Amino acid sequence: MFSRPLDLPLDQDGSSRFLPWIIALMVYLAALSLAVAMAIGATAGRWDQGVSGTLTVQIVPDISAGNSDKKRQAKTAKALELALTLLRDTPGVISAESLSVEEISSLLAPWLGEGSQMDELEIPRLIDVRVDPETGPDLATVKRRLAGIFGVVVDDHGIWLERLVKLAYSVEVIAFAIVLCIALAAVATVVFTTRSGMAVHHGTIEVMHLIGAQDVYIARQFQFHAMLRGLRGSLAGLAMAAVTLAALGTLAGSIDLPLFPALTLTPWQWAGLAIMPVAAALITMITARITVLRALVEMP
Protein backbone atom coordinates (compact mmCIF):
# COMPACT_ATOMS: atom_id res chain seq x y z
CA MET A 1 0.00 0.00 0.00
CA PHE A 2 2.72 2.48 1.04
CA SER A 3 4.87 1.70 -1.99
CA ARG A 4 2.13 2.44 -4.48
CA PRO A 5 3.65 4.07 -7.62
CA LEU A 6 2.45 7.51 -8.66
CA ASP A 7 2.03 8.78 -12.22
CA LEU A 8 3.20 12.23 -11.11
CA PRO A 9 6.81 12.60 -9.83
CA LEU A 10 5.69 14.35 -6.66
CA ASP A 11 8.66 13.09 -4.64
CA GLN A 12 10.90 15.35 -6.69
CA ASP A 13 9.09 18.54 -5.62
CA GLY A 14 11.24 20.75 -3.45
CA SER A 15 8.21 22.15 -1.66
CA SER A 16 6.95 18.74 -0.53
CA ARG A 17 10.29 17.72 0.97
CA PHE A 18 9.78 20.06 3.90
CA LEU A 19 6.20 18.95 4.55
CA PRO A 20 7.11 15.99 6.83
CA TRP A 21 9.36 18.22 8.93
CA ILE A 22 6.67 20.87 9.29
CA ILE A 23 4.05 18.24 10.18
CA ALA A 24 6.46 16.69 12.70
CA LEU A 25 6.96 20.04 14.44
CA MET A 26 3.24 20.76 14.50
CA VAL A 27 2.35 17.32 15.87
CA TYR A 28 5.08 17.69 18.48
CA LEU A 29 3.66 21.01 19.69
CA ALA A 30 0.07 19.77 19.48
CA ALA A 31 0.88 16.61 21.46
CA LEU A 32 2.55 18.62 24.22
CA SER A 33 -0.37 21.05 24.39
CA LEU A 34 -2.89 18.22 24.45
CA ALA A 35 -0.94 16.38 27.16
CA VAL A 36 -0.83 19.54 29.29
CA ALA A 37 -4.58 20.00 28.82
CA MET A 38 -5.32 16.41 29.87
CA ALA A 39 -2.96 16.53 32.86
CA ILE A 40 -4.35 19.84 34.15
CA GLY A 41 -7.93 18.68 33.60
CA ALA A 42 -7.31 15.50 35.61
CA THR A 43 -5.57 17.48 38.37
CA ALA A 44 -8.41 19.98 38.60
CA GLY A 45 -10.86 17.09 38.91
CA ARG A 46 -8.87 15.60 41.78
CA TRP A 47 -8.74 18.96 43.54
CA ASP A 48 -12.49 19.36 43.21
CA GLN A 49 -13.25 15.84 44.48
CA GLY A 50 -10.69 15.91 47.27
CA VAL A 51 -11.60 19.24 48.84
CA SER A 52 -15.22 19.82 47.88
CA GLY A 53 -17.57 19.53 50.84
CA THR A 54 -14.89 20.11 53.48
CA LEU A 55 -14.07 22.82 56.00
CA THR A 56 -11.07 23.29 58.24
CA VAL A 57 -11.45 24.84 61.67
CA GLN A 58 -8.33 26.12 63.40
CA ILE A 59 -7.92 26.62 67.13
CA VAL A 60 -5.17 29.22 67.45
CA PRO A 61 -3.29 29.02 70.79
CA ASP A 62 -3.46 32.03 73.10
CA ILE A 63 0.10 33.34 73.08
CA SER A 64 -0.63 36.48 75.06
CA ALA A 65 1.75 37.44 77.87
CA GLY A 66 1.24 35.79 81.25
CA ASN A 67 0.01 32.44 79.89
CA SER A 68 2.18 29.49 80.81
CA ASP A 69 2.53 26.49 78.50
CA LYS A 70 0.31 24.38 80.71
CA LYS A 71 -2.41 27.02 80.91
CA ARG A 72 -2.22 27.68 77.17
CA GLN A 73 -2.51 23.98 76.34
CA ALA A 74 -5.48 23.56 78.70
CA LYS A 75 -7.26 26.54 77.14
CA THR A 76 -6.63 25.19 73.63
CA ALA A 77 -7.86 21.72 74.59
CA LYS A 78 -11.04 23.15 76.09
CA ALA A 79 -11.71 25.26 72.99
CA LEU A 80 -11.08 22.20 70.83
CA GLU A 81 -13.60 20.05 72.70
CA LEU A 82 -16.21 22.81 72.67
CA ALA A 83 -15.75 23.40 68.94
CA LEU A 84 -16.05 19.66 68.22
CA THR A 85 -19.29 19.47 70.21
CA LEU A 86 -20.85 22.45 68.44
CA LEU A 87 -19.76 21.26 64.98
CA ARG A 88 -21.13 17.75 65.49
CA ASP A 89 -24.46 19.23 66.58
CA THR A 90 -24.64 21.50 63.52
CA PRO A 91 -27.19 20.29 60.93
CA GLY A 92 -25.55 19.33 57.65
CA VAL A 93 -22.21 18.39 59.21
CA ILE A 94 -21.38 14.77 58.43
CA SER A 95 -18.35 14.49 60.71
CA ALA A 96 -15.89 16.62 62.66
CA GLU A 97 -12.59 15.08 63.73
CA SER A 98 -9.57 16.75 65.31
CA LEU A 99 -6.14 16.11 63.83
CA SER A 100 -3.40 14.96 66.15
CA VAL A 101 -0.16 16.88 66.53
CA GLU A 102 1.62 14.14 64.58
CA GLU A 103 -0.82 14.47 61.67
CA ILE A 104 -0.45 18.24 61.62
CA SER A 105 3.34 17.88 61.67
CA SER A 106 3.21 15.54 58.67
CA LEU A 107 1.13 18.11 56.78
CA LEU A 108 3.67 20.84 57.51
CA ALA A 109 6.71 18.67 56.78
CA PRO A 110 6.82 19.39 52.99
CA TRP A 111 7.15 23.12 53.76
CA LEU A 112 9.09 23.13 57.05
CA GLY A 113 11.21 20.04 56.45
CA GLU A 114 11.31 16.66 58.15
CA GLY A 115 13.88 17.76 60.71
CA SER A 116 12.00 20.84 61.92
CA GLN A 117 11.50 21.32 65.65
CA MET A 118 7.70 21.14 65.69
CA ASP A 119 7.56 21.11 69.48
CA GLU A 120 9.04 24.59 69.61
CA LEU A 121 6.34 26.04 67.34
CA GLU A 122 2.90 27.21 68.40
CA ILE A 123 0.94 25.10 65.92
CA PRO A 124 -2.83 25.63 65.76
CA ARG A 125 -5.01 22.59 66.35
CA LEU A 126 -7.04 21.59 63.31
CA ILE A 127 -10.50 20.10 62.94
CA ASP A 128 -11.39 18.36 59.69
CA VAL A 129 -15.09 18.99 59.01
CA ARG A 130 -17.02 17.02 56.40
CA VAL A 131 -20.28 18.61 55.29
CA ASP A 132 -23.03 17.58 52.94
CA PRO A 133 -22.35 19.44 49.65
CA GLU A 134 -26.09 19.76 48.98
CA THR A 135 -27.63 20.44 52.39
CA GLY A 136 -24.58 21.33 54.46
CA PRO A 137 -24.26 24.59 56.41
CA ASP A 138 -22.64 27.62 54.83
CA LEU A 139 -19.60 29.39 56.16
CA ALA A 140 -21.67 32.07 57.95
CA THR A 141 -23.65 29.45 59.89
CA VAL A 142 -20.51 27.67 61.09
CA LYS A 143 -18.86 30.95 62.13
CA ARG A 144 -21.97 32.03 64.03
CA ARG A 145 -22.09 28.81 66.05
CA LEU A 146 -18.38 29.04 66.86
CA ALA A 147 -18.34 32.78 67.54
CA GLY A 148 -18.04 32.44 71.31
CA ILE A 149 -14.92 30.25 71.25
CA PHE A 150 -11.57 32.02 71.53
CA GLY A 151 -9.03 31.46 68.75
CA VAL A 152 -11.38 29.81 66.23
CA VAL A 153 -10.64 30.44 62.53
CA VAL A 154 -12.86 28.80 59.87
CA ASP A 155 -11.31 28.10 56.47
CA ASP A 156 -13.75 27.35 53.66
CA HIS A 157 -11.81 25.46 50.96
CA GLY A 158 -14.44 26.28 48.38
CA ILE A 159 -13.39 29.94 48.25
CA TRP A 160 -9.81 29.39 47.06
CA LEU A 161 -10.57 26.07 45.39
CA GLU A 162 -13.07 27.68 43.04
CA ARG A 163 -10.45 30.18 41.86
CA LEU A 164 -7.84 27.46 41.52
CA VAL A 165 -10.13 25.21 39.50
CA LYS A 166 -11.17 28.11 37.26
CA LEU A 167 -7.51 28.86 36.58
CA ALA A 168 -6.82 25.22 35.77
CA TYR A 169 -9.77 24.98 33.39
CA SER A 170 -8.74 28.27 31.74
CA VAL A 171 -5.29 26.84 31.07
CA GLU A 172 -6.96 23.71 29.71
CA VAL A 173 -9.11 25.73 27.31
CA ILE A 174 -6.07 27.70 26.14
CA ALA A 175 -4.18 24.46 25.51
CA PHE A 176 -7.04 23.09 23.39
CA ALA A 177 -7.17 26.41 21.52
CA ILE A 178 -3.47 26.06 20.76
CA VAL A 179 -4.10 22.57 19.37
CA LEU A 180 -6.85 23.98 17.15
CA CYS A 181 -4.57 26.78 15.88
CA ILE A 182 -1.85 24.24 15.11
CA ALA A 183 -4.35 22.12 13.16
CA LEU A 184 -5.44 25.16 11.13
CA ALA A 185 -1.81 26.04 10.45
CA ALA A 186 -1.19 22.47 9.27
CA VAL A 187 -4.16 22.68 6.89
CA ALA A 188 -2.86 25.97 5.47
CA THR A 189 0.59 24.41 4.99
CA VAL A 190 -0.84 21.42 3.13
CA VAL A 191 -2.92 23.72 0.91
CA PHE A 192 0.14 25.80 0.01
CA THR A 193 2.29 22.73 -0.62
CA THR A 194 -0.36 21.07 -2.76
CA ARG A 195 -0.95 24.15 -4.87
CA SER A 196 2.81 24.53 -5.35
CA GLY A 197 3.00 20.93 -6.53
CA MET A 198 0.16 21.47 -8.96
CA ALA A 199 1.90 24.54 -10.36
CA VAL A 200 5.11 22.57 -10.89
CA HIS A 201 3.28 19.72 -12.68
CA HIS A 202 0.76 21.89 -14.52
CA GLY A 203 1.88 20.65 -17.92
CA THR A 204 1.78 16.99 -16.89
CA ILE A 205 -1.72 17.43 -15.48
CA GLU A 206 -2.90 18.90 -18.77
CA VAL A 207 -1.46 15.92 -20.67
CA MET A 208 -3.21 13.52 -18.28
CA HIS A 209 -6.47 15.35 -18.95
CA LEU A 210 -5.94 14.99 -22.69
CA ILE A 211 -5.49 11.21 -22.44
CA GLY A 212 -8.68 10.87 -20.41
CA ALA A 213 -7.61 11.09 -16.76
CA GLN A 214 -10.43 12.20 -14.47
CA ASP A 215 -10.08 14.88 -11.80
CA VAL A 216 -10.65 12.29 -9.09
CA TYR A 217 -7.75 10.20 -10.40
CA ILE A 218 -5.39 13.20 -10.38
CA ALA A 219 -6.56 14.21 -6.91
CA ARG A 220 -5.86 10.67 -5.72
CA GLN A 221 -2.21 11.10 -6.74
CA PHE A 222 -1.78 14.17 -4.56
CA GLN A 223 -3.80 12.90 -1.61
CA PHE A 224 -1.89 9.62 -1.40
CA HIS A 225 1.43 11.46 -1.54
CA ALA A 226 0.30 13.96 1.10
CA MET A 227 -0.99 11.19 3.36
CA LEU A 228 2.38 9.41 3.32
CA ARG A 229 4.25 12.63 4.05
CA GLY A 230 1.85 13.53 6.85
CA LEU A 231 2.03 10.09 8.43
CA ARG A 232 5.82 10.02 8.43
CA GLY A 233 6.07 13.49 9.88
CA SER A 234 3.40 12.92 12.53
CA LEU A 235 5.02 9.69 13.72
CA ALA A 236 8.32 11.50 14.15
CA GLY A 237 6.62 14.37 15.98
CA LEU A 238 4.76 12.00 18.31
CA ALA A 239 7.98 10.12 19.11
CA MET A 240 9.70 13.38 20.07
CA ALA A 241 6.69 14.39 22.18
CA ALA A 242 6.70 11.03 23.98
CA VAL A 243 10.38 11.44 24.89
CA THR A 244 9.75 14.98 26.13
CA LEU A 245 6.72 13.96 28.21
CA ALA A 246 8.60 11.02 29.72
CA ALA A 247 11.45 13.33 30.73
CA LEU A 248 9.05 15.89 32.21
CA GLY A 249 7.20 13.15 34.10
CA THR A 250 10.46 11.92 35.62
CA LEU A 251 11.42 15.43 36.73
CA ALA A 252 7.93 16.13 38.11
CA GLY A 253 7.98 12.88 40.06
CA SER A 254 10.86 14.20 42.19
CA ILE A 255 8.81 17.25 43.26
CA ASP A 256 6.79 16.41 46.36
CA LEU A 257 4.16 19.16 46.51
CA PRO A 258 0.51 18.36 47.27
CA LEU A 259 -0.95 20.82 44.75
CA PHE A 260 1.63 20.32 42.00
CA PRO A 261 -0.11 18.84 38.94
CA ALA A 262 0.99 15.35 37.98
CA LEU A 263 2.58 15.33 34.53
CA THR A 264 2.18 11.61 34.08
CA LEU A 265 -0.51 10.37 31.71
CA THR A 266 -2.84 7.41 32.08
CA PRO A 267 -2.90 4.60 29.48
CA TRP A 268 -6.13 6.04 28.04
CA GLN A 269 -4.50 9.44 27.65
CA TRP A 270 -1.49 7.89 25.93
CA ALA A 271 -3.92 6.08 23.63
CA GLY A 272 -5.50 9.43 22.78
CA LEU A 273 -2.10 10.84 21.85
CA ALA A 274 -1.33 7.74 19.78
CA ILE A 275 -4.30 8.55 17.53
CA MET A 276 -2.70 11.85 16.49
CA PRO A 277 -0.57 10.43 13.61
CA VAL A 278 -3.67 8.83 12.08
CA ALA A 279 -5.65 12.02 12.52
CA ALA A 280 -2.82 14.11 11.03
CA ALA A 281 -2.53 11.78 8.04
CA LEU A 282 -6.28 11.92 7.41
CA ILE A 283 -6.37 15.72 7.72
CA THR A 284 -3.45 15.98 5.31
CA MET A 285 -5.04 13.60 2.82
CA ILE A 286 -8.47 15.22 2.90
CA THR A 287 -7.01 18.72 2.65
CA ALA A 288 -4.88 17.77 -0.35
CA ARG A 289 -7.84 16.11 -2.08
CA ILE A 290 -10.16 19.10 -1.62
CA THR A 291 -7.43 21.52 -2.70
CA VAL A 292 -6.68 19.59 -5.91
CA LEU A 293 -10.32 19.15 -6.88
CA ARG A 294 -11.06 22.85 -6.41
CA ALA A 295 -7.95 23.85 -8.32
CA LEU A 296 -8.80 21.50 -11.20
CA VAL A 297 -12.24 23.07 -11.51
CA GLU A 298 -10.60 26.48 -11.87
CA MET A 299 -8.17 25.27 -14.54
CA PRO A 300 -9.10 26.29 -18.12
Image (spheres, rainbow, N blue to C red):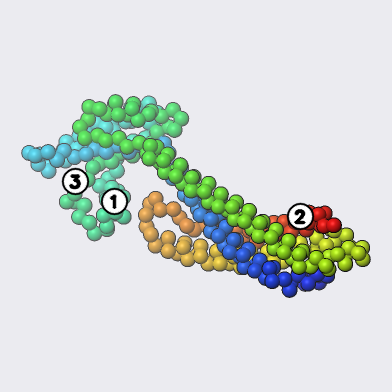
Asked if one can make out residue 125 in the rendered structure from this viewpoint, the answer is yes
For the residues bearing labels 1 and 2, Cβ distance under 8 angstroms = no
Depth check, front residue: 7 or 245: 7
**Which element carries disc 2, helix, strand or loop?**
helix
For the residues bearing labels 3 and 1, Cβ distance under 8 angstroms = no
Nearer the camera: disc 3 or disc 2: 2
Which residue sits furthest front? Answer: 300
Specify the quadrant of the image occupied by residue 205. Answer: bottom right
Work out which quarter of the rendered image holds the C terminus and state it: bottom right
Which residue corresponds to the image point at 32% horizontal and 37% vertical from the top-left? 155
At label 3, the amino acid type is Glu
Residue 76 coordinates in the image, percent (x, y):
19, 38
Which residue corresponds to the image point at 76% horizontal and 70% vertical from the top-left? 10
CA gap between label 3 and label 2 equals 72 Å
CA gap between label 1 and label 2 equals 61 Å
Asked if one can make out residue 232 in the rendered structure from this viewpoint, the answer is no
**Which element carries disc 3, helix, strand or loop?**
loop
Tag 3 residue:
122
Indicate left or right for 100 with 266 as reference.
left
Depth check, front residue: 93 or 184: 184
Tag 1 residue:
108
Seen in the picture, residue 81 relative to 264 is either above or below; the reply is above
Q: Which mark is residue 127?
A: none
